[in-house]
Image (cartoon, rainbow, N blue to C red):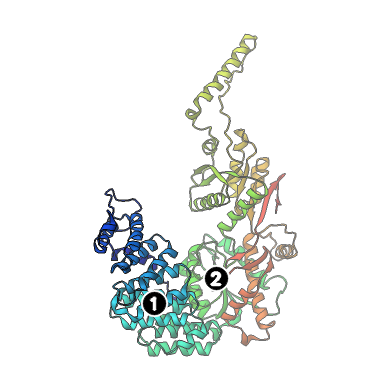
Amino acid sequence: MRIIKTILSISLICSISILFLSCAKQGPMRSVKSQKKTTIKNSTNLTGSSAYEQLQVLHNSREYEKYLQESSGFITAYPNSGYLDRVYNQRGLLLLGMKRYQEASEELKKASDFGPSSSVYVSSNYYYALSEYKNNNPDSSINAIKEIEENKTQDNDLYVKSQILKSNIQMEKGDRKAALKSLADLYRETNDLELKSKIKLNSLSIIDKMDLSELKSVEGEYTDTGLADAIIFKLGEKYFESDSAGAARERFNDLLSTFPESEYRSQAENYLARLEGLDKADPFTIGVVLPLTGKNSAYGLKTLSGIQLGVGVFGPQRTKSIIKLSVMDSQSDPGVAKMAVDKLLNEDKVSAIIGPLGGDETEVVSKQCTLAGVPNITLSNKDNIEGLGKYVFRMSMTNKSQISRLVDYAMNDIGIKRFGILYPNDNYGQELSKYFWEEVLRRGGEIRAVEYYEPGKSDFRDEVMKLFDIYYVGARLPEYKEIEKAIEEEEAQLIAEGKKPSKRKKEVSLPPIIDFEGLFIPDDARVGSQIAPYLPYYDVKDVTLLGTNTWNSQRLVARGGEHIDGAIFVDGFYSNPSFKEGNSFYHEFKTAFNSSPGILEAQGYDAGRLIAKAIDELTDGGKKKEQVNRESVRKELLSIGSFTGATGKISFDKNGEVQKELFVLGVDKGKIILKE
């Protein structure tokens, strides 16, 4: 559904900013006074007319504080002046522009008390209504607007603004029907096509916020305002969401026949197709879209094995329902993934889809599933997935969630406050280093040093030397010279004592400047283990290495040896879980596939288990097939709450994001251990 954003075409804020134009044509109010000083001379000797003219000179010179001071004297000196209503009006407008709303209300009320015969009557009432709105006195605002409605011919522009303000107040009070009526009445009254367009946008925003009962109460109305089709469409959508398929069909068909040119036509047709699909879906068939051939096939096959174990294709039968899998190969190609989903929906009639893994494929699949109303558990860590929270649920951890957990542990559990970053100059490295930097700053920490390297590099001497200020000798030349002199003196002393200095001249080495306690390296286990030995080589001590889930590999400890001890990283799965479900998964997977599972297998397992559990609950173990469709599966997924799987306790937030506590892992004496 197209989301209609509220566009307050005649903005209240804009009203404040231009309100001075009715009194002065020389630009906006400035806080700096004009260089030319103007005062009312000897005002007691002037007529009311002359004094008023001098007040206008002050006003037009933008000496507003002076104006407020002198106009107060004018009111005292000329209590019966014919200009008094205009003076009160000007004072109120100035105070409103200064955001002194209470004072503005008092002055504008005095101006409006002069009655309809005053030339500023409508102006005073509108801006009084506006200032009372700012003062949180909506009833006073509405009463002032009623006065404008009875005298709208005096100033049509302010009348239009007052109706917009009235609608806003009614919305804030929760009376959406009245707010819509106010705008609809205004729509009928004006012949200004541009204004009509803006009013319609505001009206559509109100309709978008109406509930089912409110929409039913206005159904059939506003046929002369271009809103009737929007009301019918929104009503059909509400019926669809409340599982009233018959009523939804009736509204969407009514829209197509009554308003064949409606902008909602394609959306109504899509809903009708989804309603047809609800009836045809096989509740016990789950679709799977993964890369099973090509460059990412290893990842796809790992994930598939986890899904198969989760739904009972292999291993023990975990549900009373017999779940079938319809598996499609995406080949890591978005176009192929799209065709795969089309087949799953139209031929295999699946009730839900698991996958894919890649970001580009996910973008395509999530759109298709959202349009078709099919629950989709995606295993991608891509941010900003379309449809997330409605039909798309994310089972995988994201890069942001990893960084949040890692920084939280580093700062709050082991007390690191200052960090360095050494990252690969590729998309992954740039993205994670950016998230890390932002998260550290958000939590009050500091980033003290940042260096990057080109992907595929194996020699990191220069980058490490730069991190610890030992690369650019010129920047520490006095210190370098001092060390060089000390070496020469040491050699001279040896010669003086009759000893031979070493044939190999002692190298001048600057000591590292260790300005941080934690070094974040967003790269794989191979690179992490290669960088680790450089720190002791350059005499860097007490710096904790920090990584991502790519470090959760035996290659890290095998290659890094003692140098990687103390490293910290996070992952969504731990190979030796202590909780019952995780331990069962680990041993069942090893029995079924004769290999140890990792995060991909674990996430696939949890996705399969979750959908199978939803179907089992809905069908009472396969006994009530007629009560299950794609929409009911979606709602069951949302209502499951907390679910404990191979990766721990899992739930989804209102945005469809998985909520689970990632594992903090570390290296201790050559072993990967659970830290928290």
Q: Which residue is mark 2?
A: 389
Percent position of residue 103, x then y: 42, 63
**Whether residue 231 is situated above or below residue 125 in the rendered picture:** below
Give the distance between the C-alpha atoms of the residues marked 2 and 1, in whole angstroms.
41 Å
Q: Could you say which quadrant of the image residue 253 lies in? A: bottom left
Report the residue at 56% width, 75% height from top. Answer: 375
**Local SS, label 2:** loop
Q: Could you say which quadrant of the image residue 634 lies in? A: bottom right
**Whether residue 48 is situated above or below residue 487 in the rendered picture:** below
Left-right relation of 45 to 447: left
Left-right relation of 287 to 216: right
Left-right relation of 332 to 650: left
**Whether residue 96 is situated above or below residue 232 in the rendered picture:** above
Q: Which amino acid type is marked by label 2?
A: Gly
Residue toward you, 216 or 186: 186
Q: Could you say which quadrant of the image residue 106 lies in? A: bottom left
Q: Earlier in the sequence, mark 2 or mark 1?
A: 1
Q: Quadrant of the N terminus?
A: bottom left
Report the residue at 65% width, 40% height from top. Answer: 563
Percent position of residue 314, x then y: 68, 71
**Local SS, label 1:** helix
Q: Which amino acid type is marked by label 1?
A: Ile
Residue 153 shows in this picture: yes
Percent position of residue 476, x then y: 51, 28
Percent position of residue 72, x then y: 36, 60
